[in-house]
Image (tube, grey):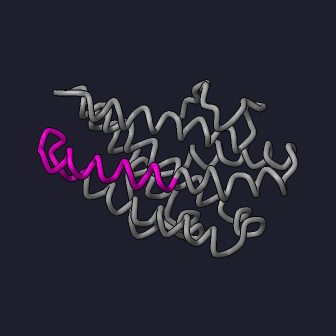
């Protein structure tokens, strides 16, 4: 997953391997991909959506595997479970979107609704979860988590798998096998 430098006032750049900076950069890229998908037409729309779908699937899986256990400890069980529930719902909606024709009116309407839900989720993470992680975990711990996040992303599925979403244990158990199938499917498609 590529990272992008951002001028967002919500955060400042820190060392590249800080988990929070990686996730904030991904949030920025997700926002950008939603806009590009909505604005694109023809084959470009499918390509933008495929990139968005892949980034969201990998991002949410890696968050559940690496960030959520720490968030549960420092931000509380209720906070971590709320974010996991949102990610589970998002995974189901992403799977439904994947089955639609990207040129249909239904896809456009559902994508816009999904964009709002994802934005709401990201805002919760950025306002409630990330500040607690920053306050309770020093830079070395965040760097270690960032390295583990990148490793988790390499084994994360690139398509939504609703049965595993929202559960870090299921992500660790099912995720690597689903990722193998997803990456083979992606290679065959193109």
Q: Residue furthest left?
A: 104
**Residue 109 lies in the magenta stretch:** yes
| Residue at image location 55% in from the left, 49% down from the top | 155
Q: Which residues are magenta?
A: 98-121
Q: Main secondary structure of the magenta part?
A: helix
Can you say which quadrant of the picture contains the N terminus? top right
User: Could you say where residue 76 lies in the image, as x and y percent from the top left?
Assistant: 71, 72
User: Is 15 on the left-hand or right-hand side of 7?
Assistant: right
User: Could you say where residue 162 lies in the image, as x and y percent from the top left?
Assistant: 39, 65
User: Could you say where residue 141 lies in the image, as x and y percent from the top left?
Assistant: 84, 49
User: Is 143 on the left-hand or right-hand side of 167?
Assistant: right
The residue closer to the viewer here, 136 or 50, is 136
Q: Is residue 119 above or below residue 33?
A: below
The tally of labels here is 0
| Residue at image location 65% in from the left, 62% down from the top | 68
Q: Quadrant of residue 108?
A: top left
| Residue at image location 57% in from the left, 56% down from the top | 124
**Residue 124 lies in the magenta stretch:** no
User: Is 108 on the left-hand or right-hand side of 10?
Assistant: left
| Residue at image location 66% in from the left, 58% down from the top | 128
Q: Is residue 97 above or below residue 81?
A: above
Q: Is residue 22 above or below residue 65?
A: above
Can you say which quadrant of the picture contains the C terminus? top left
Q: Residue furthest front?
A: 9
């Amino acid at each position: 997953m590529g990272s992008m430098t951002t001028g967002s006032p919500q955060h400042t750049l820190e060392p590249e391997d800080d988990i929070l900076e990686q996730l904030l950069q991904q949030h920025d890229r997700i926002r950008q991909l939603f806009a590009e998908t909505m604005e694109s037409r023809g084959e470009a729309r499918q390509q933008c959506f495929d990139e968005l779908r892949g980034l969201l699937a990998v991002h949410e899986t890696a968050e559940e595997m690496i960030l959520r256990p720490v968030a549960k400890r420092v931000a509380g069980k209720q906070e971590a479970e709320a974010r996991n529930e949102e990610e589970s719902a998002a995974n189901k909606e992403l799977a439904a979107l994947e089955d639609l024709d990207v040129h249909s009116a239904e896809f456009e309407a559902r994508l816009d609704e999904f964009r709002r839900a994802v934005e709401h989720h990201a805002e919760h993470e950025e306002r409630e979860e990330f500040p607690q992680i920053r306050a309770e975990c020093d830079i070395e711990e965040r760097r270690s988590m960032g390295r583990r996040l990148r490793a988790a992303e390499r084994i994360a599925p690139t398509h939504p798998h609703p049965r595993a979403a929202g559960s870090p244990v299921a992500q660790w158990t099912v995720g690597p096998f689903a990722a193998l199938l997803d990456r083979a499917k992606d290679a065959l498609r193109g």
